[in-house]
Image: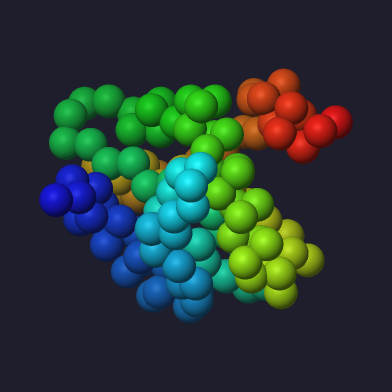
Amino acid sequence: MNKGKPFEDLVFQFLTLKGCEVLARNYRSRYGEIDIVALCRNKLLIVEVKGSFKNENPASRVDCTKVRRIYKTYLRFLSEFPKYRDFETFFLTASVKGEKINWSPVVLEDCIETLQRLSGF
């Protein structure tokens, strides 16, 4: 059973109520998984959902290894669905505690060395 499903369902409902089109849930590639891919106001959102019942910041569990997997999976998504390549893209963490969602950007610059190796720069 997916322990994160209730948290993902809450974020899905939130995005849908805000008028976003959810393009994929639990999009998988051999590199990893993206919890939610959504199109909102002509912006592509790549969302990693983290939930917690404890007194912790769920977003703190998104490290450079996880960012690398998300990014590689995002590149796979774009190769499968090239019509989304030109959209401005935001990588976000949705931290869920109870019914509250806190949004924070995934700071790719923190993992720039890892991402440069992936991109061949």
Residue at the spot 24% in from the left edge and 48% down from the top edge: 4
Count of numbered labels shown in the rendering: 0
Residue at the spot 48% in from the left edge and 33% down from the top edge: 66
Q: Which quadrant of the figure has residue 86?
A: bottom right
Q: Compared to 97, does 23 lie above or below? A: below
Quarter placement of the C terminus: top right
Percent position (x, y) of residue 89? 67, 56
Q: Compared to 92, does 27 lie above or below? A: below
Percent position (x, y) of residue 27? 44, 59
Using the rendered image of the protein, determine whether residue 105 is visible from the camera's viewpoint.
no
Residue at the spot 48% in from the left edge and 47% down from the top edge: 30
Compared across the picture, whether 21 is left or right of 96 comes to right
Compared across the picture, whether 29 is left or right of 84 comes to left
Using the rendered image of the protein, determine whether residue 107 is visible from the camera's viewpoint.
yes
Percent position (x, y) of residue 99? 23, 53
Q: How is the image coloured?
A: rainbow
Q: Which quadrant of the figure has residue 67?
A: top right
Residue at the spot 35% in from the left edge and 65% down from the top edge: 12
Residue sticking out furthest to the right: 121
Q: Compared to 19, does 89 lie above or below? A: above
